[in-house]
Image (spheres, rainbow, N blue to C red):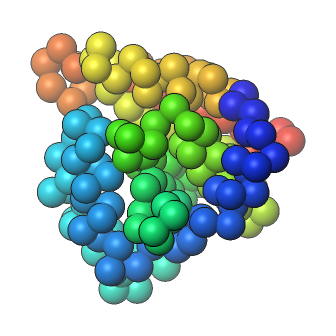
Amino acid sequence: MYPASPSQAALTAARVRPVTAADVPALKAVIDSTGLFPSALLDGMIAGYLDGSDADARWLTVAGDDGAPVAVAYAAPERFTDGTWNLYLIAVRADRQGAGVGGALLRHVEGALAAGGARVLLVETSGLPAFARTRGFYHGAGYAEEARIRDFYTAGEDKVVFWKALAPGG
């Protein structure tokens, strides 16, 4: 697990808020700073949330000292399941990585989902070496590597699926 100091937990919890349309440019900058996937994908991912057609989706951001987003998370329920959710995106601006922001945001997402009846949270990421730190983040946060689908994204790029119970009996 990623324990947060009381000051980190309080600071991050106070700054976690729902994403607004005005946040999108700053969220793209957060994603671009990680270099792990193209921020151009964000428009399609967030459109249903912003227009209200995807009412179940949870989009959260962590505001920095200036109020601008420094991190983003997106989770949605898995269709045809009872309480299983997917965390489709979590990213922290490169200059804020390693300071506990991502871990605190992940714990916030897990707590909010569990409070709403979620049982299980799944996370998918790439098996490429560039994503080793990402996979380590999930392992450190108590997620188990549940599956690896070879050549999923493209030839030579596996999809790695992580699993975590959010409720007893998950």
Q: Nearer the viewer, residue 77 or 10?
A: 10
User: Going by the image, does 2 lie left or right of 125?
Assistant: right
Give percent across and percent down for residue 153: 21, 30
Give the residue at x 78% y 62%.
115
Residue that sits furthest to the right in the current view: 168
Give percent across and percent down for residue 8: 70, 47
Q: Nearer the viewer, residue 148 or 3?
A: 3
* Image quadrant in which you'd find residue 40: bottom left
Q: Nearer the viewer, residue 141 or 68?
A: 68
Q: Is residue 26 visible?
A: yes
Residue 123 position (above or below residue 90) = above
Give the residue at x 22% y 20%.
157
Q: Is residue 117 visible?
A: no
Residue that sits furthest to the front in the current view: 66
Counting the numbered discs, the total is 0
* Image quadrant in which you'd find residue 83: bottom right
Pick the quarter of the image with the C terminus: top right
Give the residue at x 38% y 31%.
125
User: Going by the image, does 161 lie left or right of 105?
Assistant: left
User: Going by the image, does 6 lie left or right of 145?
Assistant: right
Give the residue at x 26% y 44%.
33
Give percent across and percent down for residue 71: 45, 54
Pick the quarter of the image with the N terminus: top right
Give percent across and percent down for residue 160: 41, 24
